[in-house]
Amino acid sequence: MRSGVFFSDYQGDMQLRRLPLEKLRLGLFLAALCVFPFFADTYWLTLANQIAIATIGALGLNVLVGYTGQISLGQGAFMAIGAYSSGIFAARFDIPFFLSIPIACLITAAIGVFFGLPSLRLKGLYLAIATLAAQQIVEWVITHWTGLTGGTEALVVPSPRLFGVRLNRDFNFYWISVGLALLVALFVANLFRSRVGRAMVAVRDQDIAASALGVDVFRTKLVAFATSSFLVGLSGALIAHYRGIVTWERFTLETSITYLAMIIIGGLGTVSGSFFGAAFLTLLPALITTVGRDLQTSAPGIAAVLPFVQQGVFGLVVILFLVLEPEGLAKLWRNVKDYFRTWPFSY
């Protein structure tokens, strides 16, 4: 384990990657991301795009839940706001995607602040119920405001183009989704090295003590809701432009629960945990679906049951992580790094 004083100035101590081995791992990871799309087929590129978009959404939710301690069950609602806002601006007002996406993020952030107002008086289970109400309200508005959203009909979003190049093809969109995921991860990592981020963590750990130390608890909570909603809206807007079709079924309560499971399995309050959780819960259903497709000829009975097994596996995995490793996959990854850092002196 690390011990002693490693740096003689603040610049060295404040680096995101302090040790040469950490910088090497990061360089290899970035190199792998750059090489991957040139060797992957359409199937794997689709999964990579889904993981990148889910990572952005998980990072946004982690800002609110993992770092600030504000339970939210409205993830699907805020993703829907981002998706519909960006899709409507692009489809009905012919606004380019590189303008409609940030506008949609700002709209989502504003609505997130509105639904974050009850956090002044509510916390814990009561706040979770309030955000659940936000989920139901947004779903009702989307399905009944037919003049704006189209109701239960799908909203068709034009393909994003830049210099005549269609960007929502898997290979082209990979660079957008992965690039934005890396930028969001860098933003979140630096956010919690700042005064605002440390205030969020203080509110999470003990809001009364944070208030006594001079932290404006209510303002900090609203900033957390705004930041989280902005990033979640970005995730929803990317889904709209990548898929080309926006439907309310994609942003139900099940979506909110799935993203909450992502940050629980990946690790609350960690940037790497958001990536691990998004990758895990994106690849697990894909793996089960692939196994079911392979068993359709040899064992059709098992293949027919697998869709129901998928839901059971999802719940079982969440329970196992809560019981056996509450800090998630990020903690397991830290254990692996610590083992090799101290090997062969395990003590």
Image (spheres, grey):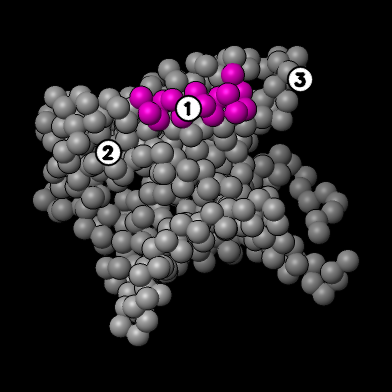
Residue neighbourhood size for the residue with mark 1, other residues' Cα within 10 Å, grouped as few (<14), some (14–19), many (≥20): many
Give residue 47's mark. Answer: none
Which residue corresponds to mark 2?
248
Comparing labels 3 and 2, the label whose residue is closer to the camera: 2
SS under mark 2: helix
**Which residue does the image show at 21% across and 52% down from the upper left?**
167
Camera-nearest residue between 229 and 31 = 229
In the displayed structure, 173 sits above or below 29; it is above
Q: Which stretch did the figure color magenta?
A: 122-137
Which image quarter: residue 158?
Answer: top left
Q: Which residue is mark 3?
A: 209
Q: Residue at x 61, y 44 (%)?
A: 268
Image quadrant holding the N terminus, namely bottom right
Q: Please, what secondary structure does the residue beneath circle 3 have?
A: helix
Give how far apart the Cα atoms at labels 3 and 2 are. Answer: 41 Å
Residue annotated with mark 1 = 131
SS for callout 1: helix
Q: As shown in the figure, which amino acid type bears the numbered disc 2?
A: Trp
Whether label 1 touches label 2, CB < 8 Å: no
Dot placed on the residue nearer the N-terminal end, 1 or 3: 1
Give the image location of residue 320, x and y in percent: 64, 57
In the depicted view, which residue is nearer to us: 250 or 94? Answer: 250
| Residue 132 colored in magenta in the image | yes
Real-space Cα distance between discs 1 and 3? Answer: 25 Å
Give the residue displayed 46% in from the left and 47% down from the top.
258
Q: CA distance from mark 1 to mark 2?
A: 18 Å
How dense is the environment of label 3, judged by Cα within 10 Å: few (below 14), some, or many (20 and up)? few
> Residue flagged by tag 3: what amino acid is it?
Ala
Relative placement, left or right, of 138 versus 33 is: left
Residue 50 in magenta? Answer: no
